[in-house]
Amino acid sequence: MKKWLFFPWILFLWACDYDDDDARVCFIGDSITYQWDLEYFFPQYMPLKHAKNGAMIQDLDDWDLRECRGIPSVILMGTNNSSEFFDEERRNAFLQKFYTRIEKIQAAPLIVVSILPRNFQRQQSSRVNEVIRNVNNRVEKGLDSLNGRFEYLDVYPLFAQDEYDARMDLFKDGLHPNIAGQEILASEVLKVLR
């Protein structure tokens, strides 16, 4: 066979072997996920994005996530619920809402990404990150007691300095990761997807 015919033949065989179902990954979240350039950072996958600016965990009740069933999925959500974290009763209610809703997604697996630290427009105290860190720890412990379809991905330390301060070099505005922050998120998610 001539060399110039060999390469197109290999490409043809590879294309026939490629299964789109194996490449699908759902991404579920709020504005952080909405602004994440998934096609750029996950070129080997077919990302299915379910994200909305300002979304809270209870908004999942209104979303059709059937296409996420049985496939790898990533959820990065909860920062818009952070006002609920300062009171123990409301924090417990958030955690219950969170577990109830993620169990309904029925992904295989569901990669739960920790809530990122924040300092929105440089106007928030480190107290908000202290309670976010507490909620992240409780989410991780709670997932351990659920049925095993979940993987917890703690990226909080990568976005924090001195434990409770957001690394502003990784954010556009203290809330949404910039390109460097998105690259860190993608790198960590890819470690779990592979």
Image (cartoon, rainbow, N blue to C red):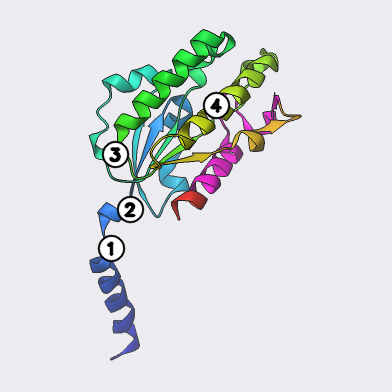
Q: CA distance from mark 3 to mark 2?
A: 12 Å
Residue flagged by tag 2: what amino acid is it?
Ala
Q: Secondary structure at mark 2?
A: helix
Q: CA distance from mark 1 to mark 2?
A: 9 Å
Q: Which residue matches tag 1?
A: 18
Residue flagged by tag 3: what amino acid is it?
Cys
Q: Secondary structure at mark 4?
A: helix
Determine contact: label 1, label 2, CB under 8 Å.
yes
Q: Which residue matches tag 2?
A: 23
Q: Answer with left or right where residue 84 lies relative to residue 125.
A: left
Q: Secondary structure at mark 1?
A: loop
The residue that appears at 24% across and 28% down in the rendered structure is 64
Give the mark nearer the N terminus: 4 vs 3.
Answer: 3
Q: CA distance from mark 4 to mark 1?
A: 40 Å
Which of the two discs, 2 and 4, sits closer to the camera?
Answer: 4
Which of the two discs, 4 and 3, sits closer to the camera?
Answer: 4
Q: Secondary structure at mark 3?
A: helix
In the rendered image, residue 188, in percent from the top left (x then y), is placed at: 54, 46
